[in-house]
Image: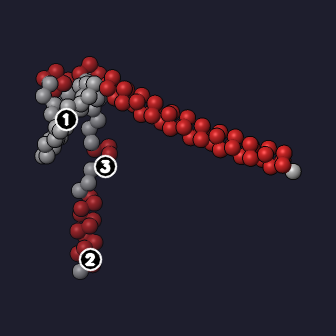
Amino acid sequence: MSADASSSTQQSTDSYKTMEEYPASTIPDLGGHMYSRLTHTWDNPEVLKAMSLDMPIVEFPAEVAEPEFPLLPRIMYEEIENGQITVWLEEVKKAEKKVWEEREHIECAEKERVEKE
C-alpha cells in the first residue's frame, strides 16, 4: 500500500511545471488608467485593451458591498482629526494645570510648616 502511495505521489510531483516552463510576459503600463477609488470590476475598455491577451482575468464570485453611508470629503476627515487633536490638547492642558496646582499646594503647605517651626 505504501508503494502505491509513493508512486502516486511521484506522478503528482512530476505533473507540476517548473518556473522555466511558464512563459514570461511584460507587464503593460497601466499608469494612465488608474481609478481614484477601488473598484470590483474592470469595465474600462482602455484598461482591457492595454492588458496582455494571455493575462488572466480574475472574477470574484462575491459582490463587494457598497458602504452604508457615502464617503466624506477629505476636508471633513481633516476637520474631524483637527477637532480630536484640539480636544486632546485641552485634556493635556487640564492635566498639566492640575499637576501644577497640586505642586503649588504642596509647596505652600511645606512653607507653612517651616514657618511654624
Give the class, few, some or many, for how many residues have Cα within 10 Å of label 3's Cα (few <14, many ≥20): few
* Circle number at residue 69: 1
Query: Nearer the N terminus, badge 3 or badge 1?
Result: 3
Q: Residue at x 80, y 49 (%)?
A: 113
* Circle number at residue 18: 3
In the rendered image, which quarter is residue 50 located in?
top left
Residue nearer the viewer, 82 or 102: 102
Q: Nearer the viewer, mark 1 or mark 2?
A: 1
Query: Nearer the N terminus, badge 3 or badge 2?
Result: 2
Q: Nearer the viewer, mark 3 or mark 1?
A: 1
Q: Residue furthest front?
A: 116
Secondary element at image label 2: helix
In the rendered image, which quarter is residue 54 located in?
top left
x and y percent of residue 61 in the render? 12, 46
Q: In the figure, is residue 106 to the left or right of 27? A: right
Amino acid at circle 2: Ala
Q: CA distance from mark 3 to mark 2?
A: 26 Å
Amino acid at circle 3: Thr
Give the class, few, some or many, for how many residues have Cα within 10 Å of label 1's Cα (few <14, many ≥20): few
Q: Which residue is mark 2?
A: 3
Q: CA distance from mark 1 to mark 2?
A: 61 Å
Examine the rendered structure and indicate whether residue 4 appears above or below residue 65.
Answer: below
Amino acid at circle 1: Phe
Secondary element at image label 1: loop
